Image: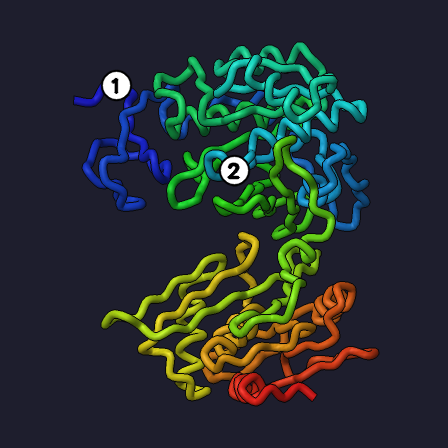
Amino acid sequence: MARDGAVYACQSCGAVQTKWAGQCPACSAWNSLVEELQSRPPGALAPSKASRTRGLVFEGLEDETPAPPRIATGVEEFDRVCGGGVVPGSAILLGGDPGVGKSTLLLQVAAQAALRGARCAYISGEEAVEQVRARAQRMGLADAPVKLAAETSLRDIVDGLKREGFDLVVIDSIQTLWSDAHEAGPGSVTQVRAATGELVRLAKKRGVAIVLVGHVTKEGTIAGPRVIEHMVDAVLAFEGERGYPFRILRGAKNRFGATDEIGVFEMGDAGLAEVKNPSALFLNTSGERAAGAAVFAGIEGSRPVLVEFQALVAPSAYGTPRRAVVGWDNGRLAMVLAVLEARCGLSLGDRDVYLNVAGGLRITEPAADLAAAAALASSALDEALPQDCVVFGEISLSGEVRSVSRMDARLKEAAKLGFRRALGPADLDGGGAREVVGVSRLADAVRRIGEGGWN
């Protein structure tokens, strides 16, 4: 029998049930309901003294609000994703796979910000102070005036931050913290929600910027209740493919800046190095372009990025053809293959298809459809695209090539790297000395690739 005041919280989605069940009714996860004690019955809120003395105050949209101040950390790629710097009083949640470099990045951010005069603290719940100090020495940041602490008690952390006047605080990680006001274990839904809420309130009240590190599940989502992503002001994802030195910092939510902005880093022996021109790293500029390769001119946030799509279409050795894709959506690949076969006459149903985005970057933009289709057609027809050609455009199920946003920015980035030609939608304007091929149907693009006609 459940104890008085006990509920059952799902460790996958955070849904709360009054009785135990083998499967969560909300997210259908098995064996995820864990008994937790509540310190206060659900829905019982403490009366607010302020609400009895002062009514709700409304303001108009026309009232002027000054832009929030920013803390420039000195790590420009991190500041770019945050919208130009870290806002005092904001809470940032950073998630990423184990070993991708989250702790390295944030230690570097705290150290660089401290060297620029900000009062910074790094609190680790996973490592001892000696381990953090040793990492700083390997990165050449041992002289940075960053305050270190190893603690998991939420009460001790909050009390310590109230005593000290910090500008930026890093807490690694939120899943290791525990509050003595709840009997659930560290990492549970109740503890993660309580710790996040308390730290966010502290950030708003004291004006300190707090960066929380979050663990991720095997599906790639941040572990714990989804409500913590709503509590914080910004959610950042640190991505990287194993075997590649490149790391992508991507903004998924930002109340003080644009979303989908990216910062690019390269992991080395001395930590993370900022990559000022990602396009030059993701491209292979040596020699002639091989059949099956197409350069995509994409947009990541506000930054144009050129990346190479590599495709291989080969005879299938087994009865069922294989489809493998890295760095792009598998469902999108299936759609492009269907359009190539139904609208362009390319027989790919009985052949193995492999598609890879070079450099470990993951592309989600629909404008990459035409680049993927061009790489596949180039491999199937064994005809290489020109070395100085970029490709972009969205493909519909009818085989139409649709226009995409910011085509001028894509072409300008391509021109800076020596690309003089472009294959894209019919309304593509070359401008200047650029040679463009605008197509309204995917079949026209495939025909040009097969014939090698670009003039």
Identity, as a three-letter code, of the amino acid under mark 2: Val
SS at mark 2 in the image? loop
Tell whether 165 sits left or right of 213: right
Relative image position of residue 390 (x, y in whole percent): 65, 72
Q: Crowdedness of circle 2 by 10 Å Cα count: few (<14), some, many (20+)?
A: many
Locate residue 25: give its quadrant: top left
* Residue position marked by numbered label 1 in the rendering: 4
At 40% from the left and 26% from the top, the residue drawn is 187
Whether residue 52 is visible, yes or no, is no
Question: Can you say whether 368 is above or below 140 in the image?
Answer: below
Q: Which residue, as the protein is rendered here, is positioned at the far right?
A: 432
- Residue, disc 2: 100
Work out how far the residue at label 1 is from the one at label 2, CA to CA, in angstroms: 43 Å
Q: Residues within 10 Å of mark 1 (few under 14, many from 20)?
A: few
* Residue 187 drawn above or below residue 346: above
Q: Position of residue 223 (x, y in %)?
A: 42, 36
